[in-house]
Image (tube, grey):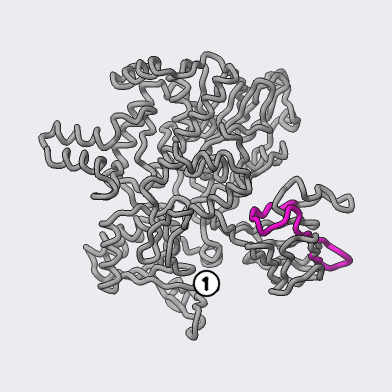
Amino acid sequence: MSTIPGQVRLNWQDPVTGEQRTPLLTCPIAFGREFAQMPAELNHQRVARIVLNSSQVSRYHTVIEWVQGHIRVTDQNSSNGTWVNGVLQPSCNVSNGDLLKIGPYEITLMFTLDGTGLPTAEASEQSIIQVPEPDSPVPAAPVAATPVNVLPPAFQANQVVVQDLYATQLLVEEIDYLAVGAGLGSFIWVNFLRISGAAPQQIRALGIEERPYARYQRLCLNSQIPPHERLRSNSDSCPDNIWGWPGYALREAWHEFNKGKLNPALQYLWQVFAEPTFIQTYTPRAGNVFASIDREAVRIGWPQMYRFGRVRAIRKTNDGRYAIAYSPGRKQTAFVVARHVHLATGYPVLQFLPDLKAYREQTRDFKSVVNAYEDHNHVYETLERQGGTVVLRGRGIVASRIIQRLHEARQRNANISILHLMRSPKPKGNRFRKAQRSVDNHFEFQPFNWPKACWGGTLREELEQATPDQRTNFLADWGGTTTADRQDWKDLVQTGLDQGWYQITFGEVTRVVPNAQSRPTTYIQEKGPRGEIQLEADFIIDATGLDSKVKASPLLNDLVTHYNLPLNPAGRLAVTNDFELLEMRNQNGRMYGAGAITFGGPYAAVDSFLGLQYTALQALDGLVAARAPNLRRLNGISSFLQWLKWAQNKTP
């Protein structure tokens, strides 16, 4: 990979999100706690400003510059100083591979001084792979994010003239409300618009799959949650029902009762009454959730509002609206002009550990090393036939389900073993004031009230009132969405440890390479006298999750770049307490965000069912306050009447 003098590859792990950050930037590069306090220019050069949100980082902490053929780090009289390779340095030249410590952030610097290139292992974003399109198989190799298609010249302006769009003689549609994404977040917002008075002809939802849960369903199936299996954490609210009654447990109990199965019906009712003290938390079956959304989609007229299209770019218009360019087919372009826009694009890519992505790129082996969210059923089919060893990376919700699925495979072939590789032990969970999360076998368990406390408890109020910096600190203290505290699964792990087919190992991965038999071999650096050891396996499963960074989405990256939008300390879209992108306000036009792309903002569990409902309600309140067309705030009477229509499956 070629580069130019003054380019530096930064590499660090975010202490809040746990994501690997590897931006390639050109000097000067400023680091600090507050974006506005860092200079936009130095010596007539534009500064790349990196926000490190921690109380240990000063507002403008340090800067990296290209000075007379050298990369130089200069501290800006910060409170805690700048450390280079463990030494406090007010100013010094640095070398390739040096470690820069700013507060809790440990940043590796990688560069060359002659412009011949950067080390290939770190030369590109290693932590993401593209999500395959719904009608295509998993790609043979991970690919970089696709750039935005070439658009008409009118889209280069900050404010598009609507007449210029019509002059292109391409399809132009003008509506009041547009949902970008057409997934669960879009569906919930559209649902709220409908029950609050908006008509189907006023609303459009743009996306690449007509069923709003299609991608979520695919991710569930790939991560081994088929329709009959129960979802895990954060699935106790009802995406199809703003009122939440009857909930999934009552519906499932009623279904069993109608089939004459009294005991299961009573068990579900007891479960929601006694959870979590006397029995584990209830969660619905995946198939029941999808069926309920299908019913509600027909009721609100989703098929009439949905439009197929890959959204390419969004621009403000000169008349206080927004122009959205999308592709309704290959090599086609069309436009929607909307007064109010809702962004719920979800996770744009699958997160992939850098060493595993490098292994796949170097070996072209996409069968032995897989992501838990890819279609990897061949792993279990092979293990059930031949047995083998699996190395598992990651220890969240997805990892817990993968362990359960591997245990099921062991029922057919006992010659299957699991080696769970973790970066470090987890002796105790996150603590906030008097509350502390429980830990068992290095798994941290999500408390029963986490999504509910985010919705209406003191956690939500504190987060809304906090500054962006304080929010980051809160999220670091609280911890995010983790594994559900399910006794059956905890017993399964303990059984595996006792019987020896499940083991936990700790260490830093140094490399993953094929051995003589072409099996992926992981080399890790252990703490203690053993030093570097190697772990051989038939398969490696990456269960580290999904990635919602703005730069991973061509659409969001274009929007942020074009309008120089600020990002919050977690690197997501900065939104107000009602989830508006304030910098995108256009006269009476409003733009809102929802879901994972707003993580780090005024709500913690943004990617849960409950979180999507909360953000949609907040956005709806903002639209009502802005006198959006045909919307009215629900009161006790109108809400009850709408619930009756829902119960009778009548159009809003």
Kind of residue at badge 1: Glu
Residue 63 inside the magenta-drawn segment: yes
Depicted 503 relative to depicted 476: above or below: below
Question: In the figure, is residue 635 to the left or right of 468?
Answer: left
Q: Secondary structure at mark 1?
A: strand
What residue lies at 35% left-to-right and 63% top-to-bottom? 440
Q: Is residue 503 left or right of residue 59?
A: left
For this rendering, which residue is in front, 78 or 639? 78
Rendering coords of residue 379 (x, y %):
35, 61
- 241 up-or-down from 231: above or below: above
Q: Quadrant of the N terminus?
A: bottom right
Magenta stretch bounds: 49-73
What residue sits 81% from the left and 66% below the top?
72
Residue at image mark 1: 508
Q: Position of residue 63 (x, y in %)?
A: 78, 59
Percent x, y of residue 390: 37, 67
Q: Residue 451's image quarter?
A: top left
Asked if residue 551 shows in the view, the reply is no
Is 330 positioned to the left or the right of 80 in the image?
left
User: In the image, what residue occupies the spot 36% across and 42% down?
Assistant: 235
Image vertical order of residue 502 relative to residue 615, above or below: below
Q: Quadrant of residue 457?
A: top left
**Residue sitting at 46 percent across and 58 percent down?**
430
Graded by Cα atoms within 10 Å as few (under 14), some (14 to 19) or many (20 or more), the crowding at tag 1 reads some
Looking at the image, which is closer to me, 180 or 234? 234
Tell me residue 31's x, y (percent): 73, 56
**Quarter of the image containing the C terminus?**
top left
Write down the quadrant of residue 439 in the picture.
Answer: bottom left
**Is 488 part of what is drawn in magenta?**
no
